[in-house]
Amino acid sequence: MKYNILGSSSKGNSIIVEDILCLDFGISYTKIKDYLSKVKLIFISHIHKDHLNPAAIKQLAYNFPNMKFLTGSKAVVGRLVELHVSKKNIFYIDTSKGNNWFDLGLISVKLEPLAHDVENYCLHFDIHGKKGIYIVDTNNVDNINAKNYDLFLVENNYQESVLKRHIQECVDEGQLRYLNRVPHTHLSAEKANTFLIENMGSNSEFCYIHQSSYNFEGEDYNGNI
């Protein structure tokens, strides 16, 4: 499956898949505007600004008033409406009624909740018969099943040993608060790799996303995000 990472960090997140699916909208409008004419659906995982950029959403709503959105978060729905997205263009999935697939035409989707400090969801998607999964900002993937999917876009934020060392060495109270928060809100390399090993098939492709250059060392760091 074709994908284009426009941003994948605390500064902003957005990935375009097969030209028609946008995964989060946390970057500037200028950076993403050239891709929007082909996009059919925008998925918002959660309400944090690096995944839902208010200024960019407001400009999008003005320039593309019929753009469709998908989310499992009521907070996201409310924020989108505040930013002038028409409620009729927001497809809200209540996962408390089951984790079911929904056929939206060109794209079929399924949401599952993820542990974070706000309501957050991963997205399973099927485009032209090929399946993918998008997982970001969570501390575990214990109950997620994506056997033999074609594309895995999975957070690989930090290495547990590196983070532990940084916590032990840290003397700045503000930085220490942030570091102590990381294991509760982000996925470690160890957990990400276990998930990939358990779910990938022989033809699967994966990409690590939302990696921290500070809490990551070695060749598995993508370096471009």
Image (tube, grey):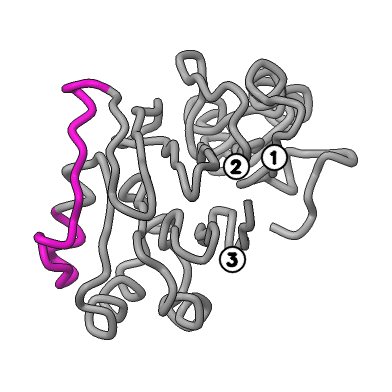
Query: Identity of the amino acid at label 1?
Result: Phe
Which class describes the residues within 10 Å of circle 3: few (<14), some (14-19), or many (20+)? Answer: some
> As displayed, is residue 198 above or below residue 50?
above
Q: Which of 140/110 is in front?
A: 110
> As displayed, is residue 76 above or below residue 11?
above
Q: Quadrant of residue 6?
A: bottom right
Q: Are marks 2 and 3 in contact (CB under 8 Å)?
A: no
User: What secondary structure is marked by label 2?
Assistant: strand
Residue 146 in picture, x, y percent from top left: 53, 25
Residue span colored magenta: 78-98
Residue 127 in picture, x, y percent from top left: 47, 49
The residue carrying mark 2 is: 153
The residue carrying mark 1 is: 206
Residue at (16, 22) in percent of width and height:
97
**Sequence-wise, which precedes: disc 1 or disc 2?**
2
Q: Which of 147/170 is in front?
A: 147
Q: CA distance from mark 1 to mark 3?
A: 16 Å
Which class describes the residues within 10 Å of circle 1: few (<14), some (14-19), or many (20+)? Answer: some
Residue 44 in picture, x, y percent from top left: 35, 51
Horizontal side of 133 relative to 91 (left or right) equals right
Query: Identity of the amino acid at label 2?
Result: Leu
Q: Which of 157/86 is in front?
A: 86
Check residue 97 for magenta coloring.
yes
Residue 35 in picture, x, y percent from top left: 49, 76
User: What secondary structure is marked by label 3?
Assistant: strand
Mark in the foreground, 1 or 3:
1
Q: Are marks 1 and 2 in contact (CB under 8 Å)?
A: yes
The residue carrying mark 3 is: 6
